[in-house]
Image: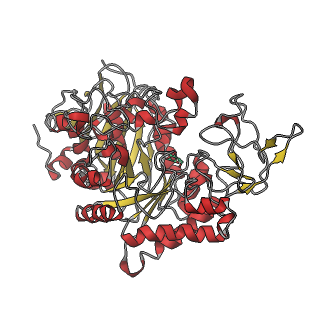
């Protein structure tokens, strides 16, 4: 079917990566250690499991990984409640295991980023235990306030603030006779960054891991670190009537405070101590769910980049080509000059890409992110198109889900995004020798797993590898980016060096195969193109020639073309 072209949108998004840094075109992979690989059969992933499987990252053409927390923790928020910032939880191994991991990773040319969680510690941390007892200087390490006594004689917290996981952001402590602030679970008391000693203490945490040799940090929930000092009530958002729901308030006093950016600058100074004497620049990637203006400010604060959550927060399986175009163009246009873009597909807090966009559409989206300029961030499992897995209320572990109660558990829980990686068709998908795992293994694992995909000629993993290889081509690394809305269902990008477009990705969001004349919207196309890859089951033979005036794009799929001269330069086999 020939499609009438109804929109012409073409914006040259300019040269990319004027100044090359070692991480400018990084493929960054997130390992969720609990679910990556269990080496000792206790049903929980661990560091040795990661060491034994680092080759998988090399196979996936990844250059670096960040790991969710492996520090000592009671596990209330799955490791984001840290009781010692400078050690490894025995559940995951030891500091020696960690050093071995670093050594092997570096030997494989993989860079390693730790997850730095500045906003809070666990209530089991020695600092909090001492703060509760009012011991100097720890008495100031957390945020304490008196609250008030109501007319009926009961206690009331200092203000109306609500925690991210639901319920009041203040918990009364009998021993200290005061309330403490926690933006997340009550077992995650907020640290007090207005206190100089605490700031220095956390800088030493950074130095501890830098001294061991890490290449940088993913910084957790950075925009929650400061709150307004006056502790005034937050205004109601009007979105819900439930005062225990985080969405009840407009978080103008507990999020995105200007001091957050200054703090990032202080951390950068610490990181810079390590690139003196020829050391490589250490990376700092910020997790801050906020609006585009506030996000962009991290670029100038000392961060390498703020995570770009556009593909997670603003796009879904029913988004239009226009929606995709505006998410991509906006980031490229708003980014300060000389900065490096980044694109996040998934993480342990969000529905998996295969569940957000559907298992058929997701591979095309994953390819799109690979072919955009800058850093790509994938979440373990996305390379095999793993969808979310059902986790019942009884099996639930995530405090965000459990606190929401049985009725709202499924809507609120992040457990389905965190279930074990599917390695092969053996017990527990090869994740563990134990048939019981900390979260349930996807029941489809016999057919949906990495090994099956490695052994198949046409699989998501093979497609992922091919796209990852294409990402290393000079045009994908440094070429200009153009984005095109071809029609209501078709979105395309091109990457080109010196105005000679050489890589094209065309995505079909619709439910029918389309035959298109790409030249009507995309200028300067050569008379023929070479199919580099089509998404799984497209039946499009890699290396075959097509006429761009009649390009077939599979339903819910994508095709990547390269210009003939490029395919010759880079050894694509022509059919
Ligand atoms: C971040 C983490 C999330 C955690 C929260 C509190 O958003 O990604 O998993 O629950 O911070 O530390």
Residue placed farthest to the right in the image? 151
Which of the 4 image quarters holds residue 452? top left
Q: Quadrant location of the N terminus? A: top left
Question: Where in the figure is residue 71, as x and y percent of width and height?
Answer: 44, 57
Position of 496 relative to 114 (above/below): above
Q: Quadrant location of the C terminus? A: top left
Rendering colour mode = secondary structure
* Residue at screen point 42% across, 67% down: 209
Which of the 4 image quarters holds residue 104? bottom left
Position of 541 relative to 479 (above/below): above
Q: Is residue 462 left or right of residue 368?
A: left
On the question of residue 528 being in view, the answer is no
Question: Where in the figure is residue 351, as x and y percent of width and height?
Answer: 44, 34
Who is closer to the viewer here, 414 or 87? 87
Q: Is residue 547 left or right of residue 253?
A: left
On the question of residue 225 being in view, the answer is yes
Position of 21 relative to 468 (above/below): below
Who is closer to the viewer here, 138 or 564? 138
Question: Where in the figure is residue 529, as x and y percent of width and height?
Answer: 21, 38
* Residue at screen point 43% across, 43% down: 347
Residue placed farthest to the front in the image? 175
Who is closer to the viewer here, 108 or 367? 108
Q: Is residue 150 left or right of residue 441?
A: right
Position of 502 relative to 313 (above/below): below
* Residue at screen point 37% across, 30% down: 389
* Residue at screen point 23% across, 65% down: 107
Who is closer to the viewer here, 164 or 258? 164
Q: Is residue 551 left or right of residue 254?
A: left
Question: Where in the figure is residue 436, as x and y percent of width and height?
Answer: 31, 34
């Amino acid at each position: 079917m020939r499609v009438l072209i109804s929109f012409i949108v073409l914006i040259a998004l300019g040269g990319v990566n004027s100044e090359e840094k070692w991480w400018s075109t990084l493929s960054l992979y997130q390992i969720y250690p609990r679910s990556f690989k269990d080496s000792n059969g206790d049903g929980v992933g661990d560091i040795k499991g990661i060491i034994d499987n680092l080759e998988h990252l090399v196979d996936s053409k990844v250059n670096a990984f960040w790991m969710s927390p492996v520090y000592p923790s009671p596990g209330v928020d799955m490791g984001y409640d840290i009781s010692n910032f400078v050690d490894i939880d025995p559940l995951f191994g030891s500091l020696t295991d960690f050093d071995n991991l670093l050594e092997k990773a570096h030997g494989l040319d993989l860079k390693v980023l730790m997850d730095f969680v500045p906003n809070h510690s666990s209530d089991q941390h020695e600092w909090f235990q001492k703060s509760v007892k009012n011991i100097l200087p720890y008495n100031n390490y957390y945020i304490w306030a008196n609250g008030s006594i109501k007319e009926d004689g009961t206690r009331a917290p200092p203000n109306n603030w609500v925690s991210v996981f639901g319920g009041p952001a203040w918990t009364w402590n009998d021993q200290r006779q005061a309330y403490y602030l926690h933006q997340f679970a009550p077992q995650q008391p907020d640290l007090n960054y207005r206190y100089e000693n605490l700031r220095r203490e956390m800088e030493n945490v950074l130095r501890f891991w830098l001294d061991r040799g890490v290449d940088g940090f993913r910084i957790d929930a950075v925009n929650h670190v400061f709150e307004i000092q006056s502790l005034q009530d937050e205004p109601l958002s009007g979105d819900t009537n439930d005062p225990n729901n985080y969405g009840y308030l407009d978080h103008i006093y507990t999020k995105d405070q200007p001091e957050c950016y200054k703090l990032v600058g202080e951390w950068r100074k610490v990181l810079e101590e390590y690139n003196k004497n020829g050391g490589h620049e250490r990376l700092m990637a910020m997790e801050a769910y906020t609006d585009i203006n506030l996000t962009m400010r991290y670029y100038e604060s000392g961060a390498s980049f703020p995570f770009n959550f556009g593909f997670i927060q603003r796009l879904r399986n029913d988004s239009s080509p226009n929606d995709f175009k505006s998410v991509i163009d906006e980031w490229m246009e708003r980014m300060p000059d000389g900065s490096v873009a980044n694109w996040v597909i998934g993480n342990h807090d969000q529905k998996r890409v295969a569940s957000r966009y559907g298992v058929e559409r997701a591979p095309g989206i994953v390819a799109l992110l690979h072919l955009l300029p800058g850093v790509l961030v994938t979440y373990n499992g996305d390379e095999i198109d793993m969808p979310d897995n059902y986790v019942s209320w009884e099996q639930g572990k995530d405090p965000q889900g459990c606190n929401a109660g049985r009725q709202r558990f499924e809507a609120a829980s992040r457990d389905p995004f965190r279930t074990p990686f599917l390695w092969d068709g053996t017990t527990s998908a090869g994740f563990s020798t134990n048939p019981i795992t900390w979260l349930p293994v996807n029941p489809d694992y016999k057919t949906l797993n990495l090994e099956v995909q490695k052994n198949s000629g046409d699989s998501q993993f093979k497609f992922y590898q091919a796209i990852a290889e294409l990402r290393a081509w000079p045009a994908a690394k440094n070429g200009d980016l153009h984005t095109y809305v071809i029609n209501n269902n078709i979105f395309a990008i091109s990457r080109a060096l010196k105005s000679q477009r050489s890589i094209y990705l065309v995505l079909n969001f619709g439910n029918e195969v389309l035959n298109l004349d790409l030249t009507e919207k995309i200028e300067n196309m050569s008379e023929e193109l070479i199919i580099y890859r089509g998404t799984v089951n497209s039946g499009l033979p890699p290396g075959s020639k097509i006429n761009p005036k009649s390009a077939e794009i599979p339903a819910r799929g994508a095709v990547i073309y390269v210009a003939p001269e490029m395919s010759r330069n880079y050894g694509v086999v022509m059919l």
